[in-house]
Image: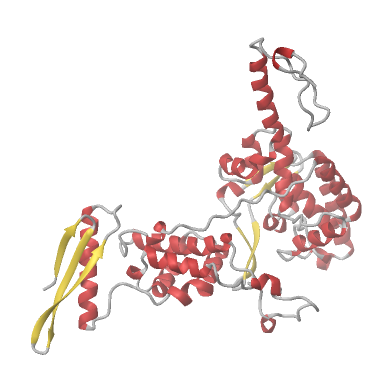
């Protein structure tokens, strides 16, 4: 018969007897509980630990699954109910890559905050991996000189962002174990994740935005031109661009409906599915000039369809490959990266065009709610956190407002417009000329 004893604050001890050499002897284990757990929850956890101790000593299998066993239950029974195939595929990669090889054989109850902290520390010392397919898995040979991962990249340890992704996967999985009663608390919540520096969103000064638009309109082929304009002028994501057909345009209202996205997983290939979030379903007002560009492009497609009707059937994809076929998901991004680098916009990505869109609108004082809706964000606070540094004009207005209050006292002389930013002020207190 086992015992459960409370020894002190957050301290317990469980014990049971085993027969050794014809005599019964006690086996006791001290337990230190999480101080955030109430006492009744600590007692339940102690009783569970007693059951596991008795199972180990008697050779009976434990009813607590290992992390590997729970991961399959979680992926198939809980996560699949709400998550998209892309999310499930991402979690499967994180699990198979660095989580299950190191933690998979441990029972859930052995995943203490201390053990997970050690795992995360060791994880950050590991070299990077490539997520791209190996050569023997490719349908066609890799281009000459193309590497899975460069030596310089492989030599770097995991970034803070990647380590956060792994920890986030473990947290989410163990939260489900708490909900179904396998754990009293989530030990991953007690693990301090790595800090990461927030990178500034890619943006461009307005003259450079205009120059880029001119280059795209005059030099890019029609599919790339439409893809870039939809991202820069309408804030569409890459997958949303790939899923658009001309039927999504309301020509009389001047709007375009975004409610689908082109996605890809290694298991499923390319497929059309729902947008990233509920807020991703949105109706966006098109710039009038963009409507004309789309109309002309559609008319060209209609004319080509009449010349070759077997290759153009039904509704047309707005961004398409030759003969109207749907583009691969990453094709517009690759197109644009090559085009941008060739024209002096190194480092600007296709996704960065969305950031350019938001920055321009905020600098022109378009209200935050409207920008958030166009971006497909679930809440304006998401937009504000991402683009707070894109509103310098607003900050200057704030300074000017405070300056008006200061001048209203009548005790301060208005500042002269600055000519040299490093020059000292020309006047001292109460307008007196500074000496020297």
Q: Residue furthest right?
A: 218
Q: Residue at x 39, y 57 (%)?
A: 190
Quadrant occupied by the C terminus: top right
Closer to us: 13 or 279: 13
Name the residue at 75% across, 52% down.
Answer: 246
Task: Work out which residue is located at the far left of the displayed protein and give it.
Answer: 23
Q: Quadrant of residue 70?
A: bottom left
Would residue 353 appear left or right of 375 to someone viewing this image? right
Q: Position of residue 123 (x, y in %)?
A: 51, 69
Res 372 quadrant in image: top right
* Numbered-mark total: 0
Q: Is residue 279 above or below residue 152?
A: above
- Residue 374 drawn at (x, y percent): 66, 42
- In the rendered image, is residue 223 in sight? no
In the shown orientation, is residue 330 left or right of residue 29?
Answer: right
**Residue 181 in sight:** yes
Residue 324 versus residue 134: which sits nearer the camera?
Answer: 134
Q: Residue at x 83, y 66 (%)?
A: 322
């Amino acid at each position: 018969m086992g015992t459960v004893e409370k020894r002190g604050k957050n301290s317990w001890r469980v014990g049971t007897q085993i027969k050794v050499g014809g005599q019964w002897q006690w086996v006791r284990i001290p337990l230190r509980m999480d101080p955030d757990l109430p006492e009744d929850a600590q007692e339940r956890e102690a009783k569970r630990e007693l059951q596991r101790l008795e199972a180990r000593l008697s050779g009976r299998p434990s009813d607590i699954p290992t992390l590997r066993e729970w991961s399959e239950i979680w992926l198939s029974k809980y996560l699949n109910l709400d998550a998209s195939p892309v999310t499930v595929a991402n979690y499967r990669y994180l699990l198979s890559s660095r989580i299950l090889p190191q933690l998979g054989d441990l029972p859930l109850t052995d995943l203490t905050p201390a053990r997970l902290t050690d795992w995360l520390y060791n994880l950050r010392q590991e070299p990077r991996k490539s997520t791209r397919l190996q050569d023997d898995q490719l349908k066609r040979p890799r281009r000459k000189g193309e590497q899975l991962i460069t030596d310089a990249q492989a030599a770097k340890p995991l970034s803070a962002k990647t380590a956060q992704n792994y920890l986030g996967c473990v947290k989410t999985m163990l939260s489900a174990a708490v909900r179904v009663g396998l754990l009293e608390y989530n030990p991953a919540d007690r693990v301090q994740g790595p800090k990461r520096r927030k990178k500034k969103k890619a943006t461009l000064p307005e003259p450079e935005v205009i120059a880029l638009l001119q280059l795209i309109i005059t030099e890019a082929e029609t599919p790339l031109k439409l893809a870039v304009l939809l991202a820069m002028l309408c804030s569409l994501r890459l997958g949303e661009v790939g899923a658009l057909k001309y039927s999504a345009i309301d020509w009389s209202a001047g709007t375009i409906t975004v409610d689908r996205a082109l996605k890809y997983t290694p298991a499923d290939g390319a497929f059309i599915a729902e947008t990233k979030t509920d807020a991703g379903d949105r109706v966006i007002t098109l710039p009038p000039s963009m409507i004309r560009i789309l109309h002309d492009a559609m008319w060209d497609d209609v004319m080509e369809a009449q010349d070759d009707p077997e290759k153009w059937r039904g509704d047309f994809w707005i961004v398409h490959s030759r003969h109207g076929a749907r583009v691969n998901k990453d094709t517009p991004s690759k197109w644009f990266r090559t085009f941008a680098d060739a024209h002096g916009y190194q480092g600007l990505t296709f996704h960065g065009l969305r950031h350019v869109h938001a920055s321009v609108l905020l600098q022109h004082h378009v209200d935050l709610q409207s920008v958030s809706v166009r971006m497909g964000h679930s809440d304006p606070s998401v937009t504000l956190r991402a683009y707070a540094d894109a509103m310098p004009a607003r900050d200057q207005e704030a300074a000017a407002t405070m300056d008006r209050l200061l001048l209203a006292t009548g005790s301060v002389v208005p500042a002269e417009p600055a000519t040299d930013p490093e020059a000292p002020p020309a006047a001292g207190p109460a307008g007196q000329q500074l000496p020297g």
